[in-house]
Every structure is written in C-alpha cells, then in structure tokens.
Amino acid sequence: MSLLELDGVRKTFGAHTVLRHVDLAVDEGECVVLIGASGSGKSTILRCINLLEEVDDGVVTFAGRDITDPRVDVDKVRAQMGVVFQAYNLFPHMSVLDNVTLAPVRVHKHDRAEARDAAMGMLERVGLAHKAKARPDDLSGGQQQRVAIARALVNSPRLMLLDEVTSALDPELVGEVLDLLGELKQEGVTMILNTHEMGFARSVADQVCFLDGGQIVERGAPEQVLDHSENPRLQQFLSRLL
Ligand code: ADP
Ligand code: MG
C-alpha cells in the first residue's frame, strides 16, 4: 500500500465543485509534482491531505489509516506532515532558531534543550546554522523558505506538502530552494508539491500530475506528461509558461 492514497476525493465550496474525483497514490520516497493553471485545485488537494479542508466525498488514506474518518485525531495526523506555503510563514518577532524550535516544544512537548539541538541540526542541514540568531526579516526570501523547510522537517514528518514554495521569490533565489528540495528527495523524503518550475519537475519528480478543472487529467513520468502528452489543455498550459 502507498503511504498516501486519495480515492475519489470530491471537494465543493458552496455550489462550486473544486475537486471532482481525484485519485492519487504516493509511495514512500516519491516526489509528486502537481501542475495546472491557477484555480485548478492544486492547493485544495494539499489542504485536503493536511485536513485543513474536509472532503465532501471520497477517502484519504495515510499510513494505512482513513484520515477522513471523523474519529481521527487531526493533530496527530498533521504532526506527521510537514507543510510549507508560498511565503510569510515564519514568525517575524522570533529568531530563526526559535521558529524552528517552536513546534517541537509546544506541539510535540519535546524537551527544550533537545528541541534546540534538533533545530540547530536542521538549520545546519539547510545551510543556515550561522543565521540561527537572526530575525526572519534579516534573511533573503530564499533563506526564509529554507528555514520554513527546516521547520517543517524538524519533526521528521512522513510526508512533506509544499505549496508553491518558490512562487514569491525573486528569480535568482529560486534555485537555492529547489536545490534543497532535490537533495531532500535524494535523501528519501516523500513530497507532494505544487510548482510552476518545470525544470524541477523534470529532474526531480517521479510523477507529474496535471490538474484541470479539479481533476487530474494527465499523470505519469515527467517526460511522458511534459513532452509526450497530446492533451490540448496541457499543451496550452505548458506553452503559456514559456
Ligand atoms: P490552485 O492552487 O490550483 O490555484 P485552489 O485549490 O487554490 O487552486 O483553488 C481551486 C478553486 O477553489 C478556485 O476556484 C478557488 O477560487 C476555489 N477555492 C479555494 N478555496 C476556497 C474557499 N475557501 N472558499 C471558496 N472557494 C475556494
Ligand atoms: Mg494554489
């Protein structure tokens, strides 16, 4: 069984059906890239997986459990997922180190000294140990996103969900964040990410899924989806990125 499985997931907002019938299987160690036009439902998929949204129909199975079952402990499920959003998710009034230490201490009730050690280790991992005492505002956007990734990783999540983590960055800062994600993939981190960075999808993804109107209409290996699809909607989407 896959680490994560979505079966027939439907999500509506009022009269608006945002996800129609989404099936997705993500294996341990896999990197899945979701692509598609703005409004196609990419973020909503991540939010349903993270239980920030309740699905209207269908099942999400994570680590062998149906997490759409109302009896599940949402916090416990979320604790096994690391989430990074587009931007601005660090607390500006706290040091970089405190940002990475916060959840292990508050949410996971880890010992403060141990949590700080783990946080320092993770900051080293993302190349930012020397910025531990700095405030987020003193870092570049790329460095801030690397801290956000460190913060998401520090609890050893089984799955990372990354929603357009480079979209708000100046172009010259995108590479350092994508390089880090590529390294994490090499280390076996399981990830689902929404991105418009097709070069990254090509070189790192195991599976690329193209969403259109709340459905995954094309999926497969990157070269298959990005180079050999005859779906006109996908071709139109890709040509607009150039
Ligand atoms: P993407 O991430 O691919 O740009 P989203 O998943 O954010 O797309 O959104 C898909 C659709 O769902 C859009 O039409 C958006 O307006 C709508 N939507 C998302 N969140 C909400 C919400 N909380 N309430 C109402 N509509 C929403
Ligand atoms: Mg989105």
Image (cartoon, helix red, strand yellow):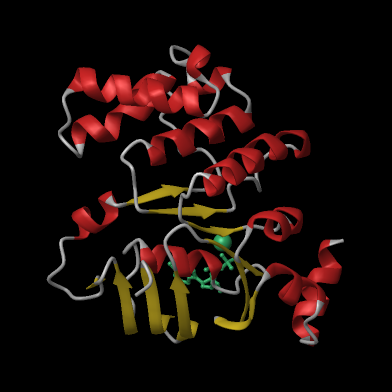
Q: Which quadrant is the N terminus positioned in?
A: bottom left
Outermost left residue: 71
Quadrant for the C terminus, please.
Answer: bottom right
Image height of 102 relative to 36, above or below: above
Q: Position of residue 217 (x, y in %)?
A: 63, 85
Instruction: Say which residue appears at 25% left-offset and 74% top-offset.
Output: 68
**Residue 171 image offset from top left, x and y in percent:** 77, 39
Residue visible at 36% across and 25% down?
119
On screen, 120 above or below 103? above
Q: Position of residue 220 (x, y in %)?
A: 64, 76
Residue 37 relative to residue 143: left or right: right
Is residue 17 something that shows in the picture? no
Residue 242 in the image: above or below residue 171: below
Left or right, 111 with reference to 11:
left
- Quadrant in the picture for residue 228: bottom right
Q: Compared with residue 16, is residue 225 higher up or lower down, i.e. above or below? A: above
Q: Locate residue 145: give its quadrant.
A: top right
Q: Write the residue at 53% across / 43% down.
A: 184
The mark tally for this picture is: 0
Look at 43% across and 21% down and name the residue there: 96
